[in-house]
Amino acid sequence: MIDFSLTERQLEIQGRVTEFIRDKIIPRENDPRQGGHGPQDDFRRELNALAKAAGLIAPHVGEEWGGMGLSHVEIAVAFEAAGYSPIGPIAMNCSAPDEGSMAMLEKIASQAQKERWLRPFASGEVRHCFAMTEPEGGAGSDPSMLKTVARADGEHFVIDGRKWLITGAQGAAFTIIMARVDGSGEKDGATMFLADMASPGIRIERVLDTIDSTFAGGHSVLVFEGLRVHRSQVLGELGEGGRYAQVRLAPARLTHCMRWLGLATRAHHIASDYARTRHAFGKPIGEHEGVGFMLADNEMDLHQCRLVIWHTAWLLDQGRRAGTESSMAKVLCSEAYFRIADRCVQILGGMGVTHDTLVERIFRELRAFRIYDGPSEVHRWALARSVLKGR
Ligand SMILES: Cc1cc2nc3c(=O)[nH]c(=O)nc-3n(C[C@H](O)[C@H](O)[C@H](O)COP(=O)(O)OP(=O)(O)OC[C@H]3O[C@@H](n4cnc5c(N)ncnc54)[C@H](O)[C@@H]3O)c2cc1C
Protein backbone atom coordinates (compact mmCIF):
# COMPACT_ATOMS: atom_id res chain seq x y z
CA MET A 1 0.00 0.00 0.00
CA ILE A 2 1.25 3.51 -0.77
CA ASP A 3 0.98 6.09 1.99
CA PHE A 4 1.39 9.59 0.55
CA SER A 5 1.62 11.33 3.92
CA LEU A 6 5.14 12.53 4.70
CA THR A 7 7.17 10.82 7.43
CA GLU A 8 8.78 12.83 10.22
CA ARG A 9 12.13 12.58 8.45
CA GLN A 10 10.65 13.77 5.14
CA LEU A 11 8.94 16.67 6.91
CA GLU A 12 12.20 17.58 8.60
CA ILE A 13 14.06 17.60 5.25
CA GLN A 14 11.27 19.64 3.65
CA GLY A 15 11.34 22.13 6.52
CA ARG A 16 15.12 22.56 6.44
CA VAL A 17 15.25 23.10 2.67
CA THR A 18 12.23 25.43 2.67
CA GLU A 19 13.80 27.57 5.42
CA PHE A 20 17.18 27.61 3.66
CA ILE A 21 15.64 28.71 0.35
CA ARG A 22 13.48 31.38 2.04
CA ASP A 23 16.23 32.84 4.26
CA LYS A 24 19.45 32.39 2.27
CA ILE A 25 18.59 31.97 -1.40
CA ILE A 26 15.53 34.06 -2.30
CA PRO A 27 17.21 37.24 -0.95
CA ARG A 28 20.07 36.58 -3.42
CA GLU A 29 17.90 35.95 -6.51
CA ASN A 30 18.64 39.36 -8.00
CA ASP A 31 22.41 39.14 -7.63
CA PRO A 32 23.86 40.84 -10.73
CA ARG A 33 26.28 37.98 -11.36
CA GLN A 34 23.64 36.24 -13.51
CA GLY A 35 22.98 36.63 -17.22
CA GLY A 36 21.57 34.90 -20.26
CA HIS A 37 23.99 32.00 -19.71
CA GLY A 38 23.17 31.43 -16.05
CA PRO A 39 24.97 32.37 -12.86
CA GLN A 40 28.69 33.14 -12.91
CA ASP A 41 30.97 30.63 -11.23
CA ASP A 42 31.97 32.83 -8.27
CA PHE A 43 28.28 33.35 -7.46
CA ARG A 44 27.59 29.60 -7.80
CA ARG A 45 30.44 28.84 -5.38
CA GLU A 46 29.09 31.31 -2.84
CA LEU A 47 25.68 29.65 -3.07
CA ASN A 48 27.28 26.20 -2.68
CA ALA A 49 29.13 27.41 0.43
CA LEU A 50 25.82 28.50 1.98
CA ALA A 51 24.27 25.08 1.23
CA LYS A 52 27.31 23.30 2.67
CA ALA A 53 27.09 25.34 5.86
CA ALA A 54 23.42 24.33 6.13
CA GLY A 55 24.29 20.65 5.50
CA LEU A 56 22.25 20.69 2.28
CA ILE A 57 24.73 19.91 -0.49
CA ALA A 58 24.07 17.19 -3.12
CA PRO A 59 20.99 15.56 -1.51
CA HIS A 60 20.99 12.79 -4.15
CA VAL A 61 24.62 11.63 -3.71
CA GLY A 62 25.73 9.03 -1.15
CA GLU A 63 27.28 10.32 2.09
CA GLU A 64 30.46 8.43 1.20
CA TRP A 65 30.96 10.86 -1.69
CA GLY A 66 29.99 14.00 0.21
CA GLY A 67 26.23 14.12 -0.37
CA MET A 68 23.19 13.65 1.85
CA GLY A 69 22.35 10.10 0.74
CA LEU A 70 18.59 10.65 0.47
CA SER A 71 16.07 8.12 -0.90
CA HIS A 72 14.13 8.96 -4.09
CA VAL A 73 11.01 10.07 -2.18
CA GLU A 74 13.18 12.22 0.13
CA ILE A 75 14.86 13.67 -2.96
CA ALA A 76 11.39 14.51 -4.35
CA VAL A 77 10.58 16.50 -1.23
CA ALA A 78 13.99 18.23 -1.08
CA PHE A 79 14.14 19.07 -4.82
CA GLU A 80 10.64 20.55 -4.88
CA ALA A 81 11.55 22.81 -1.96
CA ALA A 82 14.90 23.71 -3.58
CA GLY A 83 13.18 24.44 -6.91
CA TYR A 84 11.02 27.14 -5.34
CA SER A 85 13.88 29.45 -6.36
CA PRO A 86 15.49 29.20 -9.82
CA ILE A 87 18.90 29.30 -8.10
CA GLY A 88 17.97 26.88 -5.29
CA PRO A 89 19.05 23.68 -7.10
CA ILE A 90 22.30 25.38 -8.18
CA ALA A 91 22.99 26.32 -4.54
CA MET A 92 22.37 22.75 -3.35
CA ASN A 93 24.40 21.30 -6.24
CA CYS A 94 21.45 19.32 -7.53
CA SER A 95 20.66 21.13 -10.78
CA ALA A 96 20.72 19.65 -14.27
CA PRO A 97 22.74 18.30 -15.94
CA ASP A 98 25.14 17.73 -13.02
CA GLU A 99 22.70 15.97 -10.73
CA GLY A 100 21.81 13.25 -13.28
CA SER A 101 25.45 12.55 -14.08
CA MET A 102 26.47 12.39 -10.41
CA ALA A 103 23.82 9.73 -9.89
CA MET A 104 25.03 7.84 -12.97
CA LEU A 105 28.70 8.03 -11.94
CA GLU A 106 27.82 6.69 -8.52
CA LYS A 107 26.17 3.67 -10.17
CA ILE A 108 28.58 2.99 -13.04
CA ALA A 109 32.02 4.55 -12.55
CA SER A 110 35.00 2.58 -11.21
CA GLN A 111 36.33 3.41 -7.73
CA ALA A 112 39.26 5.30 -9.27
CA GLN A 113 36.93 7.29 -11.56
CA LYS A 114 34.69 8.17 -8.61
CA GLU A 115 37.68 9.49 -6.64
CA ARG A 116 38.89 11.54 -9.58
CA TRP A 117 35.59 12.83 -10.97
CA LEU A 118 32.68 12.25 -8.57
CA ARG A 119 34.17 13.48 -5.29
CA PRO A 120 35.02 17.05 -6.38
CA PHE A 121 31.81 17.10 -8.43
CA ALA A 122 29.53 16.23 -5.49
CA SER A 123 31.14 18.87 -3.28
CA GLY A 124 30.52 21.60 -5.89
CA GLU A 125 34.23 22.16 -6.44
CA VAL A 126 33.68 21.48 -10.16
CA ARG A 127 30.87 21.27 -12.73
CA HIS A 128 30.61 19.01 -15.77
CA CYS A 129 28.71 18.73 -19.05
CA PHE A 130 27.04 15.75 -20.68
CA ALA A 131 27.72 15.66 -24.42
CA MET A 132 25.30 13.56 -26.41
CA THR A 133 23.17 15.65 -28.80
CA GLU A 134 24.64 16.51 -32.21
CA PRO A 135 23.83 19.06 -34.91
CA GLU A 136 23.68 18.40 -38.64
CA GLY A 137 21.73 15.16 -38.74
CA GLY A 138 23.37 13.44 -35.77
CA ALA A 139 21.96 12.13 -32.48
CA GLY A 140 18.90 14.01 -31.20
CA SER A 141 15.50 12.49 -30.51
CA ASP A 142 16.95 9.37 -32.09
CA PRO A 143 20.21 8.62 -30.22
CA SER A 144 21.08 5.78 -32.63
CA MET A 145 22.05 8.47 -35.18
CA LEU A 146 25.23 9.15 -33.19
CA LYS A 147 27.97 10.48 -35.49
CA THR A 148 30.78 11.24 -33.02
CA VAL A 149 33.31 8.46 -33.41
CA ALA A 150 35.98 7.03 -31.08
CA ARG A 151 38.64 5.11 -33.03
CA ALA A 152 40.74 2.61 -31.09
CA ASP A 153 44.48 3.36 -31.10
CA GLY A 154 46.33 0.94 -28.79
CA GLU A 155 45.61 1.90 -25.19
CA HIS A 156 43.78 5.03 -26.36
CA PHE A 157 40.74 6.14 -28.31
CA VAL A 158 40.77 9.16 -30.61
CA ILE A 159 37.46 11.04 -30.57
CA ASP A 160 36.16 13.28 -33.36
CA GLY A 161 32.74 14.88 -33.56
CA ARG A 162 30.53 17.86 -32.90
CA LYS A 163 27.90 18.26 -30.19
CA TRP A 164 25.46 21.03 -29.50
CA LEU A 165 22.97 22.25 -26.87
CA ILE A 166 25.50 20.99 -24.31
CA THR A 167 24.43 22.50 -21.01
CA GLY A 168 27.15 23.83 -18.76
CA ALA A 169 30.08 23.24 -21.13
CA GLN A 170 31.32 26.78 -20.56
CA GLY A 171 33.08 26.62 -17.17
CA ALA A 172 32.86 22.82 -16.84
CA ALA A 173 35.89 20.94 -15.52
CA PHE A 174 35.10 17.69 -17.30
CA THR A 175 32.70 16.16 -19.79
CA ILE A 176 31.00 12.83 -20.35
CA ILE A 177 31.06 12.16 -24.09
CA MET A 178 28.82 9.77 -25.93
CA ALA A 179 30.68 8.40 -28.96
CA ARG A 180 30.43 5.41 -31.29
CA VAL A 181 33.44 3.14 -30.77
CA ASP A 182 35.05 1.73 -33.85
CA GLY A 183 37.64 -1.11 -33.90
CA SER A 184 38.03 -1.62 -30.15
CA GLY A 185 38.81 -5.31 -30.60
CA GLU A 186 36.20 -6.02 -27.88
CA LYS A 187 32.81 -4.41 -28.22
CA ASP A 188 32.00 -1.53 -30.55
CA GLY A 189 29.00 0.78 -30.35
CA ALA A 190 27.80 3.74 -28.29
CA THR A 191 30.17 4.28 -25.37
CA MET A 192 30.61 6.95 -22.69
CA PHE A 193 34.00 8.55 -22.03
CA LEU A 194 35.20 10.86 -19.27
CA ALA A 195 37.54 13.69 -20.28
CA ASP A 196 38.87 16.87 -18.71
CA MET A 197 37.60 19.91 -20.59
CA ALA A 198 41.15 21.32 -20.59
CA SER A 199 42.35 18.37 -22.74
CA PRO A 200 43.87 19.24 -26.13
CA GLY A 201 41.25 18.37 -28.75
CA ILE A 202 38.22 19.89 -26.94
CA ARG A 203 36.95 23.27 -28.06
CA ILE A 204 33.85 25.29 -27.28
CA GLU A 205 32.80 26.75 -30.62
CA ARG A 206 30.17 29.09 -29.19
CA VAL A 207 27.68 29.49 -26.37
CA LEU A 208 24.15 29.56 -27.79
CA ASP A 209 21.67 32.26 -26.86
CA THR A 210 18.53 30.45 -25.71
CA ILE A 211 15.07 31.08 -24.25
CA ASP A 212 16.15 30.05 -20.71
CA SER A 213 18.76 31.65 -18.45
CA THR A 214 19.05 29.48 -15.34
CA PHE A 215 21.51 26.74 -16.28
CA ALA A 216 25.09 27.49 -15.21
CA GLY A 217 27.24 27.95 -18.32
CA GLY A 218 24.30 28.09 -20.75
CA HIS A 219 24.27 25.67 -23.70
CA SER A 220 27.21 25.29 -26.08
CA VAL A 221 28.43 23.88 -29.34
CA LEU A 222 31.31 21.57 -28.41
CA VAL A 223 33.89 20.21 -30.85
CA PHE A 224 36.15 17.18 -30.43
CA GLU A 225 39.12 17.13 -32.82
CA GLY A 226 41.57 14.26 -32.36
CA LEU A 227 40.81 14.10 -28.62
CA ARG A 228 42.93 11.29 -27.13
CA VAL A 229 41.47 9.47 -24.15
CA HIS A 230 42.99 6.50 -22.34
CA ARG A 231 41.00 3.28 -21.96
CA SER A 232 40.77 4.01 -18.24
CA GLN A 233 38.52 6.95 -19.22
CA VAL A 234 35.82 4.65 -20.60
CA LEU A 235 32.83 4.99 -18.27
CA GLY A 236 31.59 1.51 -17.42
CA GLU A 237 31.91 -0.87 -20.36
CA LEU A 238 32.49 -0.45 -24.07
CA GLY A 239 29.33 -0.52 -26.17
CA GLU A 240 27.04 0.06 -23.19
CA GLY A 241 26.57 3.82 -23.65
CA GLY A 242 22.97 3.49 -24.83
CA ARG A 243 22.01 1.48 -21.77
CA TYR A 244 23.82 3.90 -19.41
CA ALA A 245 22.01 6.83 -21.03
CA GLN A 246 18.78 5.20 -19.87
CA VAL A 247 20.28 4.57 -16.39
CA ARG A 248 20.94 8.32 -16.30
CA LEU A 249 17.78 9.52 -17.98
CA ALA A 250 15.01 7.62 -16.17
CA PRO A 251 15.74 9.19 -12.75
CA ALA A 252 16.99 12.46 -14.33
CA ARG A 253 13.67 13.02 -16.10
CA LEU A 254 11.91 12.65 -12.78
CA THR A 255 14.27 14.97 -10.91
CA HIS A 256 13.58 17.67 -13.54
CA CYS A 257 9.88 17.20 -12.69
CA MET A 258 10.67 17.60 -8.98
CA ARG A 259 12.69 20.82 -9.30
CA TRP A 260 10.33 22.45 -11.79
CA LEU A 261 7.37 21.58 -9.54
CA GLY A 262 8.86 24.01 -7.01
CA LEU A 263 9.18 26.75 -9.62
CA ALA A 264 5.67 26.22 -11.03
CA THR A 265 4.36 26.46 -7.46
CA ARG A 266 6.25 29.74 -7.03
CA ALA A 267 4.56 31.19 -10.13
CA HIS A 268 1.19 30.02 -8.82
CA HIS A 269 1.83 31.69 -5.44
CA ILE A 270 2.79 34.99 -7.11
CA ALA A 271 -0.33 34.87 -9.32
CA SER A 272 -2.56 33.93 -6.35
CA ASP A 273 -1.29 36.90 -4.33
CA TYR A 274 -2.00 39.21 -7.24
CA ALA A 275 -5.50 37.73 -7.72
CA ARG A 276 -6.23 38.37 -4.04
CA THR A 277 -5.08 41.98 -4.00
CA ARG A 278 -5.64 43.43 -7.47
CA HIS A 279 -9.18 44.81 -7.95
CA ALA A 280 -11.13 45.22 -11.19
CA PHE A 281 -14.84 45.87 -11.73
CA GLY A 282 -15.44 46.29 -8.01
CA LYS A 283 -13.79 43.18 -6.56
CA PRO A 284 -10.49 41.25 -6.40
CA ILE A 285 -9.79 39.73 -9.83
CA GLY A 286 -9.58 36.26 -8.25
CA GLU A 287 -13.29 36.51 -7.47
CA HIS A 288 -14.06 36.80 -11.17
CA GLU A 289 -14.70 33.26 -12.32
CA GLY A 290 -12.33 33.52 -15.28
CA VAL A 291 -9.39 34.10 -12.94
CA GLY A 292 -10.62 31.86 -10.11
CA PHE A 293 -10.90 28.91 -12.48
CA MET A 294 -7.31 29.45 -13.65
CA LEU A 295 -6.16 29.29 -10.03
CA ALA A 296 -8.22 26.14 -9.49
CA ASP A 297 -6.74 24.53 -12.62
CA ASN A 298 -3.26 25.38 -11.36
CA GLU A 299 -4.00 23.69 -8.04
CA MET A 300 -5.25 20.56 -9.80
CA ASP A 301 -2.24 20.41 -12.13
CA LEU A 302 0.20 20.85 -9.23
CA HIS A 303 -1.55 18.19 -7.18
CA GLN A 304 -1.57 15.70 -10.05
CA CYS A 305 2.11 16.29 -10.79
CA ARG A 306 3.12 15.88 -7.15
CA LEU A 307 1.29 12.56 -6.89
CA VAL A 308 2.81 11.26 -10.12
CA ILE A 309 6.30 12.29 -8.98
CA TRP A 310 5.95 10.76 -5.53
CA HIS A 311 4.56 7.52 -6.92
CA THR A 312 7.40 7.19 -9.45
CA ALA A 313 10.00 8.06 -6.78
CA TRP A 314 8.42 5.44 -4.54
CA LEU A 315 8.76 2.83 -7.33
CA LEU A 316 12.46 3.73 -7.67
CA ASP A 317 12.85 3.31 -3.91
CA GLN A 318 11.37 -0.20 -4.32
CA GLY A 319 14.21 -0.98 -6.74
CA ARG A 320 12.02 -0.76 -9.84
CA ARG A 321 13.43 0.83 -13.03
CA ALA A 322 10.26 2.90 -13.52
CA GLY A 323 11.37 3.86 -17.04
CA THR A 324 7.83 4.06 -18.42
CA GLU A 325 6.52 5.84 -15.32
CA SER A 326 9.29 8.46 -15.39
CA SER A 327 8.66 8.96 -19.11
CA MET A 328 4.93 9.50 -18.46
CA ALA A 329 5.73 11.81 -15.52
CA LYS A 330 8.02 13.87 -17.75
CA VAL A 331 5.30 14.45 -20.35
CA LEU A 332 2.56 15.09 -17.79
CA CYS A 333 4.64 17.48 -15.68
CA SER A 334 6.37 19.40 -18.48
CA GLU A 335 3.02 20.12 -20.14
CA ALA A 336 1.20 20.91 -16.88
CA TYR A 337 3.95 23.30 -15.69
CA PHE A 338 3.83 25.20 -18.95
CA ARG A 339 0.05 25.54 -18.69
CA ILE A 340 0.48 26.79 -15.11
CA ALA A 341 3.13 29.35 -16.08
CA ASP A 342 0.99 30.53 -19.00
CA ARG A 343 -2.06 30.98 -16.74
CA CYS A 344 0.07 32.88 -14.22
CA VAL A 345 1.28 35.30 -16.91
CA GLN A 346 -2.37 35.83 -17.89
CA ILE A 347 -3.54 36.43 -14.31
CA LEU A 348 -0.82 39.06 -13.81
CA GLY A 349 -1.98 40.99 -16.88
CA GLY A 350 0.68 43.33 -18.27
CA MET A 351 2.89 42.74 -15.26
CA GLY A 352 3.11 39.10 -16.29
CA VAL A 353 5.35 39.88 -19.25
CA THR A 354 7.66 42.24 -17.34
CA HIS A 355 10.70 41.35 -15.28
CA ASP A 356 9.02 42.88 -12.22
CA THR A 357 7.98 39.43 -11.02
CA LEU A 358 9.66 36.05 -11.50
CA VAL A 359 6.72 34.72 -13.53
CA GLU A 360 8.02 35.91 -16.90
CA ARG A 361 11.32 34.09 -16.26
CA ILE A 362 9.53 30.95 -15.04
CA PHE A 363 7.45 30.93 -18.24
CA ARG A 364 10.65 31.03 -20.32
CA GLU A 365 12.49 28.46 -18.20
CA LEU A 366 9.71 25.92 -18.44
CA ARG A 367 9.27 25.95 -22.22
CA ALA A 368 12.35 23.90 -23.05
CA PHE A 369 11.40 21.15 -20.60
CA ARG A 370 9.00 19.73 -23.21
CA ILE A 371 12.00 19.19 -25.50
CA TYR A 372 15.08 18.04 -23.53
CA ASP A 373 15.35 14.53 -22.12
CA GLY A 374 13.06 13.48 -24.94
CA PRO A 375 10.39 15.66 -26.59
CA SER A 376 6.79 14.92 -25.51
CA GLU A 377 6.06 13.42 -28.94
CA VAL A 378 8.88 10.89 -28.63
CA HIS A 379 7.65 9.74 -25.20
CA ARG A 380 4.08 9.46 -26.54
CA TRP A 381 5.31 7.58 -29.61
CA ALA A 382 7.28 5.09 -27.45
CA LEU A 383 4.33 4.67 -25.12
CA ALA A 384 1.94 4.11 -28.03
CA ARG A 385 4.27 1.45 -29.45
CA SER A 386 4.30 -0.43 -26.17
CA VAL A 387 0.49 -0.16 -25.94
CA LEU A 388 0.17 -1.59 -29.47
CA LYS A 389 2.53 -4.45 -28.59
CA GLY A 390 0.17 -5.28 -25.74
CA ARG A 391 3.03 -4.57 -23.24
C1 LIG B 1 17.61 23.67 -22.95
C2 LIG B 1 18.18 22.42 -23.51
C3 LIG B 1 19.26 21.80 -22.86
C4 LIG B 1 19.83 20.66 -23.39
N1 LIG B 1 20.94 20.10 -22.78
C5 LIG B 1 21.55 19.03 -23.33
C6 LIG B 1 22.74 18.50 -22.78
O1 LIG B 1 23.24 18.98 -21.75
N2 LIG B 1 23.34 17.46 -23.39
C7 LIG B 1 22.82 16.90 -24.52
O2 LIG B 1 23.43 15.95 -25.01
N3 LIG B 1 21.70 17.38 -25.09
C8 LIG B 1 21.05 18.43 -24.53
N4 LIG B 1 19.91 18.96 -25.10
C9 LIG B 1 19.41 18.38 -26.32
C10 LIG B 1 18.11 17.62 -26.18
O3 LIG B 1 18.30 16.42 -25.49
C11 LIG B 1 17.54 17.46 -27.58
O4 LIG B 1 17.12 18.75 -28.00
C12 LIG B 1 16.37 16.49 -27.65
O5 LIG B 1 16.80 15.17 -27.43
C13 LIG B 1 15.68 16.56 -29.01
O6 LIG B 1 16.60 16.37 -30.03
P1 LIG B 1 16.68 17.45 -31.23
O7 LIG B 1 16.78 18.80 -30.65
O8 LIG B 1 17.76 17.01 -32.16
O9 LIG B 1 15.28 17.35 -31.94
P2 LIG B 1 14.92 16.50 -33.26
O10 LIG B 1 15.43 15.12 -33.10
O11 LIG B 1 15.35 17.28 -34.44
O12 LIG B 1 13.33 16.47 -33.17
C14 LIG B 1 12.55 17.62 -33.49
C15 LIG B 1 11.10 17.34 -33.18
O13 LIG B 1 10.65 16.24 -33.96
C16 LIG B 1 9.59 15.58 -33.30
N5 LIG B 1 9.87 14.13 -33.24
C17 LIG B 1 11.07 13.49 -33.20
N6 LIG B 1 10.89 12.15 -33.13
C18 LIG B 1 9.56 11.94 -33.12
C19 LIG B 1 8.72 10.78 -33.05
N7 LIG B 1 9.25 9.54 -32.94
N8 LIG B 1 7.39 10.96 -33.04
C20 LIG B 1 6.82 12.18 -33.10
N9 LIG B 1 7.56 13.32 -33.18
C21 LIG B 1 8.90 13.20 -33.18
C22 LIG B 1 9.48 16.20 -31.90
O14 LIG B 1 8.43 17.13 -31.89
C23 LIG B 1 10.82 16.94 -31.73
O15 LIG B 1 10.71 18.04 -30.85
C24 LIG B 1 19.31 20.09 -24.57
C25 LIG B 1 18.22 20.70 -25.20
C26 LIG B 1 17.66 21.85 -24.68
C27 LIG B 1 16.51 22.47 -25.40
Image (cartoon, rainbow, N blue to C red):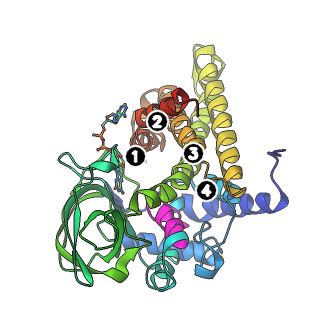
The residue lying toward the viewer, choosing from 195 and 238, is: 238
Q: Is residue 77 visible?
A: yes
Tell which circle, 2 or 4, labels the residue nearer the N-terminal end.
4
Q: For the residue labelled by badge 2, is the local secondary structure a helix, a strand or a loop? A: helix
> Magenta segment: does it hold 298?
no
Which numbered mark, 2 or 1, is in the foreground of this view?
A: 2
Q: For the residue labelled by badge 4, is the local secondary structure a helix, a strand or a loop? A: helix
Residue that mark 4 sits on: 79
Q: How far apart are the alpha carbons under marks 2 and 1?
A: 16 Å
Tell which circle, 4 or 3, labels the residue nearer the N-terminal end.
4
Q: How far apart are the alpha carbons under marks 2 and 3?
A: 13 Å
Q: Are marks 2 and 1 in contact (CB under 8 Å)?
A: no
**Amino acid on which disc 1 is placed:** Tyr
Residue that mark 1 sits on: 372
The yes-or-no answer for disc 1 within 8 Å of ligand 1 is: yes
Q: Residue at x 65, y 72 (%)?
A: 68
Q: Residue at x 63, y 38 (%)?
A: 305
Which numbered mark, 3 or 1, is in the foreground of this view?
A: 3
Residue that mark 3 sits on: 326
**Amino acid on which disc 3 is placed:** Ser
The residue lying toward the viewer, choosing from 360 and 273, is: 360
Q: Are marks 2 and 3 in contact (CB under 8 Å)?
A: no
**76 shown above or below 63:** above
Residue that mark 2 sits on: 382
The x, y position of residue 219, in whole percent, is 30, 56
Q: How far apart are the alpha carbons under marks 4 and 3?
A: 16 Å
Q: Residues within 10 Å of mark 3 (few under 14, many from 20)?
A: many
Tell which circle, 4 or 1, labels the residue nearer the N-terminal end.
4
Q: Residues within 10 Å of mark 4 (few under 14, many from 20)?
A: many
The yes-or-no answer for disc 2 within 8 Å of ligand 1 is: yes
Which numbered mark, 2 or 3, is in the foreground of this view?
A: 2
Tell which circle, 3 or 1, labels the residue nearer the N-terminal end.
3
